[in-house]
């Protein structure tokens, strides 16, 4: 999720929102008395204060309530040295799980634990072990709220703008400023005055002491206004009260802290202080004003007025906005402090309020509610989502009742269903949800892969429920659901299973024979969740949200079509003959009887072409989601749409071909919607071509039902003859409404060579490919197929991902569409049907050997022969190449070799490839054919290549590499970073670290140790504590020996080759080490814990 630009004007990179509605402008009278403090007095005070001020480095491990997950800097100061208590802001202590360290001015660093955060006001406390400070002489800073007055000269001492120690001067200008409003959907203080001064504090100064010349803290720095130099300080009266309660718990530091209950009362009503002039306009009687002025302190200028009331609270239906508070229990109250003192002293008791509503006196009796009872202290984590009871803070912001089931972070499962952050879940799987326990109960009854409806409301559209379809994770992308509960004794949030794990049974699905997902294993009984809710790839803190939910900040690829042409006609069925070529043949009488029962099978649009009518039943709309926990291989989004074509359909297996800008990686959830039959079923990625831009996805035909299986067809592939310039083709695809759309086009270039540059974050890019260009199409978001007039598929009209760069630091993701010849698809399909000699994969309950692909891991680009002649290529070779291919008139040159390939140190950049095995080559397909011929020969997989290098012809024996179509099948999460083997797009950069290559950091998680210490993506980890980590197995062996809380020395190498050494502190409590691996025996991604908090190696 991204960090806000500014938050509370306090933490590093966090401050006031730029959209604050009010702009303050005020003038103050001269100080009431001359300030007698001298420079020497200030020097002495600062010498005493600075050693007690600490820099706090906090990491919010999970999004919770008003705060997102993230890492930041702030300030605190010691208020009780003997007991080891540090005072800072509530938004620093965080309402949810937090890990923090305090660094004193002499660079001594200690771990601190939260012991209290106020539910309303912006203050909280950390505790530390005073004995851990060995080399610093310091004293606690006394709290003196009574010393604050207008005109008082003050100093703000803290970590302003990350400068460790910064001292800012100012003068208190106001003591009765309204509490600042920071965010409409985040933390805001209320029911208190704030102080104001023009001290100009910035990010990082949250929690700084505001001191006078005697070294006393008179206020607590809380926020600032980014558009001016104004700073906002919290008064200390309620802080002093809370500190006294904590001090009563013991006279000295104890290793085992005993949680202290600090009484806090509330009416769930917000009051504002308004001047008498405005209150008169609200109808205040003059007699009441006279009573208030006489009973209040000298100089009182107004009274308290009800601003808002939370539904369902004690004041609901009793108090209304505009009510003027006159008395409480017979005592005139015009100040926040007196009202709050009374409420805190009468928790769970009745009080009597005398108010005036439009000039009419009223008296109401209300029961003071325990404020802690409506402050959530537990949450459910499921599939990366954080769900907990709605807090008083957010209930006040959104005007909902406290305790409703609130989505603090949607995670993956809810993100797939488009459930936004801040949603309130009202109904799930047909059952009303009023509290978190209801949701847990429903979840425990659901099976993996189940699809159930969910209803929610949002504060942005509060009067209407929205209904979505939630799919329970079928693969083990995330750990089992956990309930985290706050433990104030340890300062940690302890986790336990949300329910008995065997209650979440597997569902049926793609790999099932009888029903929808049969061969899914039971979820492993594992402890703790991984907490992956947001991921980043760059080395900066992203502020944009991924697809408006995911925090990598890159939008999804969506297909949109302007014209919708209806065509549901079905003419023929496709089946495979012994050669694997799809043929059109007539259905049997029985099947025709079944088809005739389905109206869509006989409804053909009058204006649809023959090609469109034939091909429509073979088209499939893809919706692909990638879980944040395994966004591998540089995939740039969580959500993709696209159109694919069925290339094989039988009673036991269906295969769909689609571009790799729709199905980018195998670790994804694929849903298929068929044009021929209204059904949506899951698919499984079974083959990702290592070079060509296509993937094969399998589905289970039995899930279509007898009618669906009969009307769904496979297309006939026509790999030969190849398309030529000027040929007419039909471009056919699907609109988002699953309506076939087509147009007749002309091939303008049948062999356009692609040249896609590497993205900032390396990801798959099509190389060594010739594509088909048309004169007209439907735009860059429309994909489908190219067919002849009989509906035979000659090419896939697929999407390609690229990145446009503007200047040095700005880039933007784009996509374009081109035709992909089907010859490569046809070759792989033949091998699958005939029974390849590769590794087996379970598809629909049947193990099928999948093909291996022999490739030359070298990137080529074509050069015109006219240019080659200028480089010195002989006329004989030019004539030979022209004779071989009179159309292209080109020669292939080496752009680079993939690092770690067998060709790496043999071919050089700029080499011209003239012949392979003495046969001239002019295009990429010539080299592909030569590689495939090696599978039938006995030459150890080497190509005899003739190249032209720097004016000389050279014969080389170059090795080829054999790759499968599985993609990356193993990933490790360590300290919040996603680690994998370097994928082809990284190796295509031509560089791997010399230190045994290392493992590659693909992503990192907000709120994790790697976020806290800066181990970001796009680099290799080559050593940990001096031990080499050349591959994932070595990495696991090293990391599983590391203990909880241990500082680890990590050596990394960036993509640019720059080495770096950093240290980080391992946190197994919130971030255990786990592995996710694809199991071809079950076709399921399984999770395995490697190291947990109890130091078990699993």
Image (spheres, grey):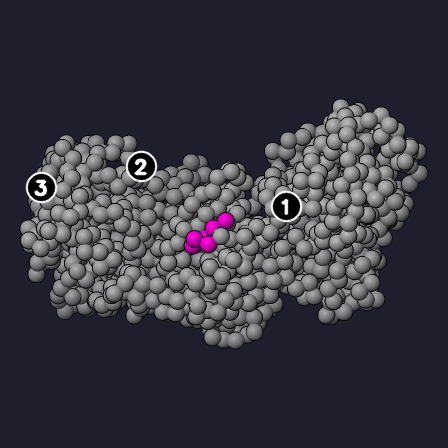
Residue hosting label 3? 790
**Rendered residue at 91%/41% (across/down):** 38
Q: Residue 11 carries which label?
A: none
**Rendered residue at 47%/75% (across/down):** 1098
Q: Can residue 791 be seen in this view?
A: yes
Sequence order check, earlier mark of 3 and 2: 2
Q: Is residue 859 visible?
A: no
Residue hosting label 2? 560
Q: Gap between marks 2 and 1, in whole Å?
A: 45 Å
Sequence order check, earlier mark of 3 and 1: 1
Q: Residue 312 carries which label?
A: 1
Q: In this view, does 818 lie to the left or right of 759?
A: left
Report the mark closest to the observer, 3 or 1: 1
Q: In the depicted view, which residue is nearer to us: 39 or 389?
A: 389
Residue 726 point in image, percent of width and height: 11, 34
Q: What element carries label 2?
A: loop
Residue 224 in which image quadrant: top right
Q: In this view, does 102 lie to the left or right of 748?
A: right
Residue 86 in which image quadrant: bottom right
- The part of the chain drawn in magenta is 426-431
User: Would you say residue 596 sits in the magenta stretch?
Assistant: no
Residue 1084 point in image, percent of width and height: 34, 65
Q: Is mark 3 on a helix, strand or loop?
A: loop
């Amino acid at each position: 999720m991204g960090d806000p630009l500014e938050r509370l004007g306090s933490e590093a990179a966090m401050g006031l929102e730029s959209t604050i509605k009010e702009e303050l402008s005020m003038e103050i009278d001269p100080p009431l008395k001359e300030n007698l403090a001298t420079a020497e007095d200030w020097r002495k005070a600062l010498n005493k204060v600075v050693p007690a001020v600490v820099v706090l480095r906090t990491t919010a491990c999970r999004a919770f309530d008003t705060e997102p997950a993230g890492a930041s800097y702030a300030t605190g100061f010691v208020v009780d040295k003997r007991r080891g208590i540090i005072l800072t802001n509530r938004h620093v202590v965080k309402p949810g799980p937090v890990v923090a360290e305090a660094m004193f001015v002499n660079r001594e660093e200690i771990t601190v634990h939260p012991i209290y955060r106020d539910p309303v006001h912006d203050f909280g406390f950390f505790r530390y072990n005073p004995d851990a400070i060995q080399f610093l002489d310091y004293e606690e800073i006394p709290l003196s709220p009574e010393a604050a007055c207008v005109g008082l000269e003050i100093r703000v001492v803290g970590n302003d703008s990350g400068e460790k120690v910064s001292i800012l001067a100012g003068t208190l200008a106001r003591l009765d400023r309204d509490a600042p409003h920071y965010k409409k959907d985040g933390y805001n203080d209320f029911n208190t005055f704030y102080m104001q001064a023009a001290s100009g504090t910035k990010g990082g100064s949250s929690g700084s002491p505001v001191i006078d010349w005697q070294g006393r803290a008179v206020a607590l720095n809380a926020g600032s206004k980014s558009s001016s130099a104004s700073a906002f300080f919290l008064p200390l009266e309620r802080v002093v009260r809370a500190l006294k309660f904590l001090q009563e718990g013991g006279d000295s530091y104890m290793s085992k802290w005993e949680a202290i209950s600090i009484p806090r009362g509330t009416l769930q009503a917000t009051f504002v202080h308004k001047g008498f002039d405005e209150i008169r306009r609200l109808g205040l009687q003059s007699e009441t004003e006279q009573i208030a002025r006489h009973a209040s302190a000298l100089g009182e200028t107004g009274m308290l007025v009800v601003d808002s009331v939370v539904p369902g609270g004690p004041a609901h239906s009793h108090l209304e906005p505009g009510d003027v508070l006159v008395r409480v229990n017979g005592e005139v109250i015009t100040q926040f402090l007196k009202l709050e003192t009374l409420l805190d002293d009468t928790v769970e008791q009745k009080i009597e309020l005398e108010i005036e509503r439009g000039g009419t006196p009223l008296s109401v009796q209300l029961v003071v509610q325990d404020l802690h009872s409506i402050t959530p202290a537990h949450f459910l984590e499921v599939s990366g989502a954080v769900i907990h009871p709605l807090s008083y803070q957010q209930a006040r912001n959104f005007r909902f009742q406290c305790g409703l089931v609130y989505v603090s972070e949607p995670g993956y499962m809810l993100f797939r269903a488009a459930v936004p952050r801040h949603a309130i879940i009202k109904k799930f799987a047909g059952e009303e949800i009023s509290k978190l326990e209801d949701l847990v109960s429903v979840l425990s009854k659901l099976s993996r892969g189940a699809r159930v409806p969910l209803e929610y409301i949002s504060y942005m559209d509060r009067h209407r429920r929205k209904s979505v379809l939630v799919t329970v994770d079928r693969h083990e992308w995330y750990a089992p659901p956990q309930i985290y509960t706050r433990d104030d004794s340890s300062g940690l949030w302890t986790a336990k299973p949300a329910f008995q794990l065997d209650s979440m049974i597997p569902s049926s699905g793609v790999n099932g024979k009888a029903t929808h997902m049969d061969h899914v294993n039971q979820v492993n009984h594992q402890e703790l969740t991984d907490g992956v809710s947001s991921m980043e790839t760059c080395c900066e803190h992203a502020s944009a949200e991924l697809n408006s939910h995911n925090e990598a900040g890159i939008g999804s690829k969506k297909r949109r079509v302007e014209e919708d042409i209806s065509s549901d006609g079905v003419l023929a069925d496709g089946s495979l003959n012994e050669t694997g070529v799809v043929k059109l043949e007539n259905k049997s009488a029985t099947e025709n009887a079944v088809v005739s029962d389905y109206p869509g099978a006989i409804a053909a649009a009058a204006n649809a072409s023959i090609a469109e009518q034939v091909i429509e039943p073979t088209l499939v709309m893809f919706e692909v989601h990638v879980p944040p926990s395994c966004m591998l291989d540089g995939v740039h989004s969580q959500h993709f749409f696209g159109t694919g074509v069925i290339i094989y359909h039988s009673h036991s297996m269906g295969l769909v071909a689609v571009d790799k800008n729709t199905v980018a990686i195998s670790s994804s959830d694929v849903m298929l919607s068929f044009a021929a039959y209204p059904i949506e079923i899951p698919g499984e990625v079974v083959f990702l071509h290592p070079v060509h831009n296509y993937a094969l996805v399998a589905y289970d035909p039995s899930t279509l039902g007898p009618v669906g299986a009969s009307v769904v067809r496979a297309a006939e592939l026509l790999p030969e003859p190849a398309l030529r310039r000027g040929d007419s083709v039909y471009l056919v695809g699907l609109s988002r409404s699953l309506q076939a759309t087509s147009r007749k086009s002309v091939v303008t270039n049948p062999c356009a060579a692609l040249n896609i540059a590497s993205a900032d974050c390396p990801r798959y890019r099509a190389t060594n490919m010739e594509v088909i260009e048309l004169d007209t199409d439907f735009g860059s978001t429309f994909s489908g197929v190219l067919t002849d007039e009989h509906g035979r598929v000659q090419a896939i009209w697929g999407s390609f991902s690229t990145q446009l760069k503007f200047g040095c630091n700005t880039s933007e993701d784009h996509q374009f569409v081109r035709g992909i010849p089907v010859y490569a698809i046809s070759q792989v399909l033949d091998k699958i049907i005939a029974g390849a000699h590769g590794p087996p994969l379970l598809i629909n309950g049947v193990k099928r050997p999948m093909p291996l692909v022999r490739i030359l891991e070298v990137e080529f680009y074509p050069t015109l022969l006219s240019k080659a002649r200028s480089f010195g290529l002989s006329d004989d070779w030019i004539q030979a190449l022209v004779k071989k291919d009179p159309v292209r008139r080109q020669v292939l040159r080496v752009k680079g070799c993939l690092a770690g390939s067998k060709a790496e140190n043999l071919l050089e950049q700029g080499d011209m490839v003239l012949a392979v095995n003495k046969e001239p080559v002019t295009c990429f397909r010539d080299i592909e054919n030569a590689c495939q011929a090696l599978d039938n020969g006995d030459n150890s997989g080497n190509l005899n290549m003739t190249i032209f290098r720097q004016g000389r012809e050279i014969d080389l024996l170059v090795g080829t590499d054999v790759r499968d179509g599985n993609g990356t099948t193993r990933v490790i999460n360590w300290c919040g970073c996603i680690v994998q083997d370097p994928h082809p797009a990284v190796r295509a950069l031509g560089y791997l670290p010399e230190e045994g290559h290392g493992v590659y950091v693909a992503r990192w998680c907000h709120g994790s140790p790697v976020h806290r210490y800066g181990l970001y993506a796009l680099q290799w980890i080559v050593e940990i504590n001096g031990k080499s980590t050349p591959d994932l197995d070595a990495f696991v062996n090293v990391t599983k020996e590391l203990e909880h809380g241990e500082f680890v020395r990590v050596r990394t190498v960036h993509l640019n080759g720059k080495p770096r050494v950093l240290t980080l502190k391992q946190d197994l409590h919130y971030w255990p080490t786990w592995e996710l691996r694809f199991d071809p025996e079950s076709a399921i991604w399984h999770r395995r814990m490697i190291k947990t908090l109890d130091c078990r190696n699993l």
